[in-house]
Amino acid sequence: MLATSGVGIGLVGAEFASVDDPISDGSALAQTSNVGGSPDLDVYATNPNLIPGQTNQVEVTVANDGDFRFGPTSLAESVTTARGVRVEAEADGPISIESGETPIGTVTQSTPRSLPIAINVPDNIDPGTYTIDFDLSYTYFSSGDERKRTVDRELEVRVRDDARFQVVDVESDTQVGDSGTVKATIENVGSETARSADVTFTTQSSSVSVSGGQSDTIRVPEIGPGQTATVAYDVGVSPDLPVQQYTLSGTVTFDDPDGIRRTDQGLSIGVLPLTEQTFNLTNIESQLRVGEDGDLIGTVRNEGPLPARSVVVQYAGESQSVIPAERSTAVGTLEPGESSEFSLPISMSGEAEAGLRSLDMAVQYRNQDEELRAFEKLVVNADVAPERDRFAVTVENRTIQSGGSRTVEVSVTSNLNETASDVEARLFADDPLDTGETDTGYVQSIEPGETTTMTFELTATGSATPGSTYPISFDFRYDDSDGDSQLTDTFRLPVDVVEAEDGGLPIPVIIVVLLVVGTGGLVVYRRRQ
């Protein structure tokens, strides 16, 4: 643990950048032949307070009061300047110095130098004042001579009886790929009461968030000596991370009994997330077919580690040929290890390819905090059957006499997976066949697999050649289960033309003969009158 006492430590690097003596040439040395004096170095700290149980960084300033004895005052600085100053600190137990000898360069009366001293303070130290011994080594010029000197100085530091904090308990239900609550209980192990305590925890990883960011702060009004306080944070862990300890570093900034704002920087907690919530889809049964509505049936299993509420299974792909009739199907709450069957209506467009298809799936659910989450790492293989006629159409008797007319009975079987309602069929025929007055058929509804019979009138003209086969066509318009009107492709069926029975004349010829005979009889009758 590392604590900072004092200010201005960031300047040390710049001040120590050069330790060269600006007046170490011969002319400068000659200038001091008639000038006498010496540096007078001392050390002090703006904030000599130490926190037990930490390595404290104390900013120490080396100042130079200077002792000018004789000579031109314009050259006073040449003899009072300490050059090549090196600082070494030591301390008797129970505190110890972690820093080694440190060069700080030139120290004049107007330019003091600062350096950080790392002081290790044990946790069980008694409050009070402790002494640090400093050896200050340097060179200077006086009476034309370059001289070296080492002086001893002392600095008193104080171990305060402040409030200090330790983490005594951590509870977490956070999860990889999700967020959860991390509760940290801190105890004031110091001897003073901390008021207006701001407890801050900060993540050390970009893959771990605290309340959606890098850190969060919770204020506790007061924590007395020996008292505890529990603070809770929403901690999120990115997907696909390993299950391991993730560190959050903490600080407590508080008001001491004198109203001075102080900071204890020594807190740290480890967060061990639960494994990522996962699901599995098994027992997949496909009822999908090109150009039709169907169902994808299977079993969804919650692999844990936590219960999942309001679970729904949904198609998550982007294919334009796969059209979910419903975006998802609900299965309810699943405990860890629990399974449930599902059936997801899916429509395959007419442009879809038949065969084995890989479909991207997802499971959406609500976590313990009723927050919506999704597990999208699911792929299932489903067989898509080739396209088929929506209706099977057959003619009971496919023959017709040349020059004759007859009623044609047509059997219609639904191949659909849904009820077809308001089914209307229309008959089309080309010369030498022709439709009669009844060229449409209607049925109120046809269930899947059901067969119904429709009747139509069909005529064969005298030019129809016996022994030849001619086509007739049907199409069907119906409403699907969603109330949408659908029109099928055209069905073409063969009709065989046969000779008229009993060798009689074709009906059109008989009609002509009857007309001729009737007309002749009428003429004879009138003449006799």
Image (spheres, rainbow, N blue to C red):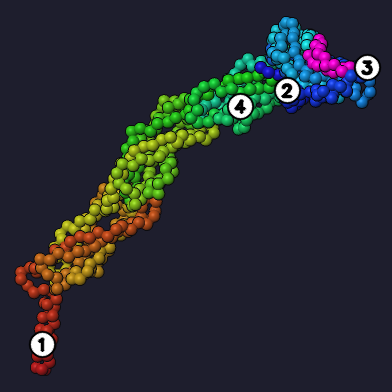
Magenta stretch: includes residue 140: yes
Labelled disc at residue 69: 3
Q: Looking at this view, is 125 or 275 the one in front?
A: 125
Nearest to viewer (mark 1 / mark 2): 2
Residue 200 location (% of width, % of height): 67, 25
Q: Tag 1, which secondary structure?
A: helix
- Residue flagged by tag 1: what amino acid is it? Gly
Compared with 342, 95 (above or below) is above
Asked if marks 1 and 2 touch (Cβ < 8 Å), the reply is no
Please state which of residues 512 and 23 is positioned toward the viewer in this rendering: 23
Residue appearing at x 21%, y 64% in the figure: 472
Magenta-colored segment: predominant secondary structure: strand
Give the residue pinned by disc 2: 253
Q: Residue 487 carries which label?
A: none
Q: Mark 1 or mark 4: name the one nearer the start of the chain.
A: 4
User: In this figure, which residue is indicated by the disc labeled 1?
Assistant: 520
User: Of label 4 and label 2, which has the lower sequence position?
Assistant: 4
What is the C-alpha distance between the residues marked 4 and 2? 18 Å
Q: Mark 4 points at which residue?
A: 203
